[in-house]
Image: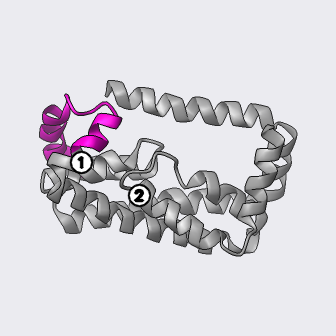
Amino acid sequence: MLRKLYDWTMGLAAHRHAMPALFGVSFIESSVFPIPPDVLMIPMVLARKARAFLIAAIATLGSVLGALLGYWIGAALMDTLGQWVLTVYGKEESYHQLAVRFAEYGGWAVLFAALTPFPFKVITIFSGAVGFSLPLFVLTAIVGRAGRFFVVAALLWRFGPPIRDFIERRLGLVFTVFMICLVGGFIALRYL
C-alpha cells in the first residue's frame, strides 16, 4: 500500500500539472490546509532534479501569497473563519496570551513558523488579527519560506539520487519518521 502511494506521488510529481498543483497546495497551506507543500515538493524535485530551484520558487511564491490570505483572514474574518481555524488547531483558548507574546516577538514568530514544520497558517492568521506590520510580515514570510524551500531543494538537487535510493529502500522507515515529525508538530502546537 505504502509503495503504491509513493509511486503515485512520484508519478504526480512528474505530471504536467504538478507545478500548478504545488502552487495551489503551497497557497492554501499557508492559510487553512493542514498538509505541508513538502509532501509534493520533495518528490517533484526528485523526479525533476534540473528544476529544483524553480520548484522551490513556485512553492515560495504560493506560500507567501497564501500567507497574505491568512493575514487577511486574521484581520477581516477573525470572529468567523479565523476563530474556526484556531479551534481546529486547539488555539482558541490561548489566543489572547499568544497575541500578547506575538506583539513582542511577531517577526521572530513568523520566521520560525515559516522555516519549521510548525503550522504556518496559525501565525499568518495571528499576524492579521493583531495588526502586525504588513511589510515586516511579508519580508519575514519571504525570507522564511524561501529559506525552507530552497534549502530542501538544494539538498535534494545536490544529493538527489542517494536520497531517492535511501527513501526507496527504507520507505517504511522514512514514512514513519515523517509521520512522527508531523504528529509531533501538531502535539507541540497544542501545548505551546
| Left or right: where 47 falls relative to 117 | right
Say what amino acid the circle numbered 2 marks: Gly
Q: Is disc 2 placed on a helix, strand or loop? A: helix
Residue carrying label 2: 144
| Left or right: where 24 falls relative to 11 | left
Residue 144 percent coordinates (x, y): 41, 58
Q: Is disc 1 placed on a helix, strand or loop? A: helix
Q: Report crowding for label 2: few under 14, some 14 to 19, many 20 or more residues within 10 A (C-alpha).
A: many
Q: Nearest the camera: 26 or 192?
A: 26
Magenta part, dominant SS:
helix
Say the numbered circle drawn on residue 82. Answer: 1
Q: Nearest the camera: 50 or 128?
A: 128
The quarter of the displayed image where residue 167 is located: top right
Q: CA distance from mark 1 to mark 2?
A: 22 Å
Residue 111 percent coordinates (x, y): 35, 52
Count of marks overlaid on the render:
2
Q: Residue at x 57, y 58 (%)?
A: 151
Which quarter shows the N terminus?
Answer: top right
